[in-house]
Amino acid sequence: MALFASLAFTAQAQEPEATPLDTLTNRVGMMQSNLDVLNRIKISGYLQPQYQVADSTGQPSFAGGNFTDTDKRFQLRRARLKAQYDAPLNENGISPAQFVFQLDVTQNGVTIKDMYGKLTDKWIGWFSLTAGMQNRPFGYEIGYSSSMRESPERGRMSQIIFPNERDLGAMITIQGPKTGNWNWLKLEAGMFNGTGGPSAGINASDFDKKKDFIGHLSATRTAGGERIKYGLGVSYYDGGYRIDTSNVWDPGKDAAGTMGFIPVSTKADVSPSKATREYTKRQYLGFDAQFSMDWAGGLTTLRGEYIEGKQPGLTSSTNPGAATTSPVAAVVANDIYNRNFNGAYFYFLHDILQSPFQAIVKYDWYDPNTDVKGDDIGKTVTGNTKATTSSDIKYTTLGLGMAYRYNENVKFTAYYDMVENETSSRLASGINFSRDLPDNVFTLRMQVKF
Amino acid sequence: MKKSILTLAIAVTTITGFAQKIVIKGSDTVLPLSQKEAESYMKKNSGKSITVIGGGSGVGIAALLDGSTDIAMSSRSLKMDERMKLKDAGKAIKEVIVANDALSVIVNPANKVGKLTREQLEAIFTGKIKNWKEVGGDDMPMVVYSRETSSGTYEFFKEHVMNRKNYASSVLNMPATGAIIQSVSQTKGAIGYVGLAYVTKDVKDVAVSYDKGKNYVIASVENAKNKSYPIVRPLFYFYPEPKEKQVKPFIDFILSAEGQKIVDQIGYVAVK
């Protein structure tokens, strides 16, 4: 015992005394180690309070939702809090795992926006699997962050065919590492519920056996000594909705040749067993392109996307802002109207010289039913054919805006949406679609980001 | 040791928030130049304080974006994505070329190979050539060193020497230029690349040919100035326009005759 005590004392006595520099070095080393752990967790977020003035009281709108009994409002459009964890880099310089959690807290309540895990192969870093609530991999605007997007809202088409942007599913991403030669090419493809992300009053649970395929192949390159960036992409969506105890209608003509909807299956054709019921198609094809150039006059960006396809929806709502062609769970309990649609958006953005000002011009259209135009919408049909309604009206929107970046955290945007609807003399009763409706919206938004 | 003390001093300065006037962060290649320029500037201007921190060009530019530096040092120009992010953050950025740098290819002094063509360098760093006997040396496996992916030197070498081909997975990525010098000096079969200012007598400079072996040129300030040495790149300072008043006196000092003399002393190529 005495021997051990003596040895311990000797060892202690022989331990070299730490110099102040050694102590400092140790402390800095410990702090660095702690910092490395903290650096794996990133917390970010942004707030978008805004004030809006609409053309008319109670007008439907895609600029942040319908105006209820008012034409002026303050709104907390988005308030996001995001936490992201990245596993430490392995010996191949790859972070093999990522976890993302994002909440949206507004006057409408709390909603989960993102909740997913992403695994990346630990050997070459080319293959990733993302599972959970995530952005749908279709086109460019859907996945483009609302904090980065220059216009206050996505285009009308994006909001209708992809409500809430997110969906529950699993996706494979194939893309070369950032330092590799093939990083410019990216393929994302996955299977999703098809119900969309949750929002106030709508949950994201699936209600049918059909899972939807969504894929996006994109290429992004730079040129001109890293002063030009351009990208191209093609997207495909193949999904469907269960047909419940409802009639299903396709675009078709009556005996007189008037375009409307003709029945393809009736309630009597629908199997009483949910397991054997048929599905109606939901199919989109999209093309997107982006171009940015940093030149003496500033940074100019052009973006565009065109989508066409087949969309199952509802029929006669005289409220054009009610997303009546949106495929929500309620669809299966109502008659389903299949429509051929197309739509597009185009952005022109210019950062003026080296100033903090950015000019924004955006044009988009959404034609929910490409088989019928103008005065033919709402035309009386005969026999077992249903007439088209205000839900088949095409909308175009021209948005003009200016953004001012106060600093790296704060941005102000003034934006005016000029909405124009297709007119039909046959839709003059109720909301008068024989003229362009007064439904423009001015938005003044402040964005605080951290 | 001297470097450790300097690093610690910088760390302490950063932690304690000592009256900093200018923070410079980024490229390890530009680091020795900035340190020397800062020392001289502070000697001449008492009361001025400059803190210089390395980490790589990407780190410096990221710091510019998050506002944790006044000047980003970089051995490459801004990438388009970085330009777009800086614009989105409302940061108007000014760029200044403070010096030019010749990139040296180095091997262990015991290695008898003294010259390589660009094509051979490409094959070595992409892993197609793996033994020194394939380029006229001893029968000895190659140990290839590179900088980390956040380094501007890494990207410049890939673009201008490797013809944008990928580095082989066997290439060892080192966190700092000093680590490459040390590893090459201690490993007989080693090869790497560093900024000319870092070359010491512990490593051997390799002459390089960009005309398929007709002419071989060794990296030197003189050869870089007369443009006979092919692997030369500009070294940048990037700073936010609103900080101009704060940083301009120091940048003016670097671009002055006195500052450019320091550029020559350090082993870089003066721009004036």
Image (cartoon, coloured by chain):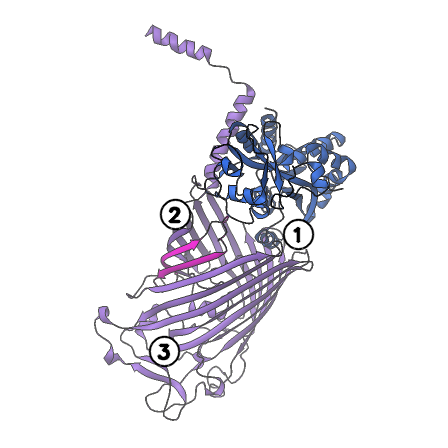
Chain colours: A purple, B blue
What is the quadrant of the N terminus of chain A in the image?
Answer: top left
Front-lying residue, A291 or B158:
B158
SS at badge 1: loop
Amino acid type assigned to the residue bearing label 3 in the image: Tyr
Amino acid type assigned to the residue bearing label 1 in the image: Ala
**Which label number is shown at residue A121?**
2
Q: Is residue B266 magenta?
A: no
Q: Is residue A182 magenta?
A: yes
Where is residue B266, by image quadrant?
A: top right
Where is residue B44, by image quadrant?
A: top right
| Residues marked 1 and 2 touching at CB (< 8 Å) | no
Residue A241 in view (yes/no): yes
Q: CA distance from mark 2 to mark 3?
A: 43 Å
Q: A312 left or right of B10? A: left
Relative to B156, say whether A322 is above or below: below
| Range of residues picked out in magenta | A168-197
Relative to A27, say whether A396 is above or below: below
Of all residues, the one furthest to the top in this rendering is A2
SS at badge 2: loop
Q: Nearer the viewer, mark 2 or mark 3?
A: 2
Q: Chain of mark 2?
A: A
Front-lying residue, B214 or A196:
B214
Q: CA distance from mark 1 to mark 3?
A: 52 Å
